[in-house]
Amino acid sequence: MKAFILAVGDELISGAVADTDSSWLAGKLLEERGIRVEGIRVCGDALEEVRGALETCALGRDLLLVTGGLGPTEDDRVREALAAFFSVPLEADGEALERLKARIRERGIAWSESMARQVRVPKGFRPLANPVGQALGLEGRIGECRVFALPGVPSEMKAMFQAQVLPRIPYAGEHASFVLTAAGEPEALVGEKLRGLMEKKEPLVGVTAQAGVVRVRILARGDGAEARARAAAEEARRALGEAFAGFGALTLGDVVVRRLEERGLTLAVAESCTGGLLASTLVEVPGASRVFLGGFVAYANQAKEAWVGVPREVLESKGAVSREAALALARGAAQRAGADLGAGITGIAGPGGGVPGKPVGTVHLAWFFRGEEHHQACRFSGDRSDVRGAAVRRSLWGILDLLCRRSPERI
């Protein structure tokens, strides 16, 4: 099956918003139906641009998924583009319109006729219910190509795709897929370990770094796909060795929580420049409360001293961004929370605040585990968000190293 994805929106072209919808959809088509998309295109909101993109992307293909351009404003033009393409009118779906009006009333918002754009359907197309939002999706055909138009809001797009679209897409023959997660080693090293598997044309094996972990995707197609994919997954697991974190698309937080739970250990953290991002990453994991006791966001020096016990003399002589301060944060987090392991982060995330010897991006990480102290000084690049995210990932990697009886200084 030949499939394509079209993402619509000026905000995508300008870079104001990242096109995460297309990558998610491509992954789901591959994993759930064995369909590998031929390509992804992004276009702006102009009516003729959308109309032309729809025609081009549908030509010679069996399936086209469109995201974005279904909202209530004048720049949401996918419905209008489809109607113009077929020279058909847009008609409001009566039931959907009444549901929309009721939902608007419940929210205490005054009704505006522009809101009705979200439930208008080009004649000849079928409306798709939106389980979590207001805009209807659309199903129809452009020539021989089956078209599904979905909202651009990721939560709405995902819910509609799972409930309304995926059940209508046939399997591309017999196929089977597995996802493995590796952690604690860089993508290049994981690729080296799996080189033999990746050089084979079947099953297809791909490696992708994502937010501190490495995902290994295996896809087999044709007769005996399940057995071949399973054998490749087991070979990949053995090859990864201690880097193997589990089957499935795990996050770095997932991996850390799993390892702590397997060892019956608890964790507490103390953060300065990351402002609670480390704790937030951990509590994103269901069941994290079994191992994560809590965290301190000790941003100001007086908070570091009063809440976590960083000695005043350390702050005055070495500074808040120092090896000594990071070690005191890690030790204080563990001791004051009663945890087996403590992690501390302090640094300069920028864009200002850098001084000679401590430029922007300087971060000190520390871990306190079973009476032993570990420290690492880092210099991260990028903007404020990049530095904070990198610091959290490196802190979690350090925790994994300690749980695997390695020193985090080796990272």
Image: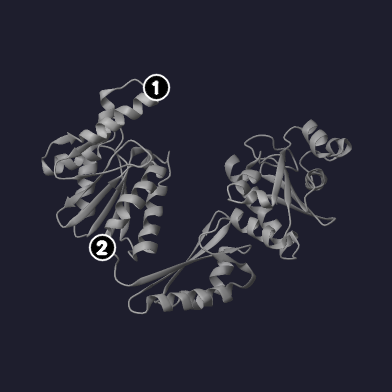
> Percent x, y for residue 188?
56, 66
Which residue does the numbered mark 2 point to in the structure image? 2
Task: Find the residue positioned furthest to the top.
Answer: 110
Please identify the quadrant where the N terminus is shown. Answer: bottom left
> Percent x, y for residue 144?
16, 57
Residue at 32 percent of width and 56 percent of height: 166
Of pointers 2 and 1, the one earlier in the residue sequence:
2
Residue at 19 percent of width and 56 percent of height: 145
> Percent x, y for residue 299?
72, 35
Callout 2 amino acid: Lys
Please identify the quadrant where the C terminus is shown. Answer: bottom right
Q: Residues within 10 Å of mark 2 (few under 14, many from 20)?
A: some
Which residue does the numbered mark 1 point to in the structure image? 108
5 versus 190 height, above or below: above
What numbered label is drawn on residue 81? none
Residue at 87 percent of width and 38 percent of height: 311
Callout 1 amino acid: Gly
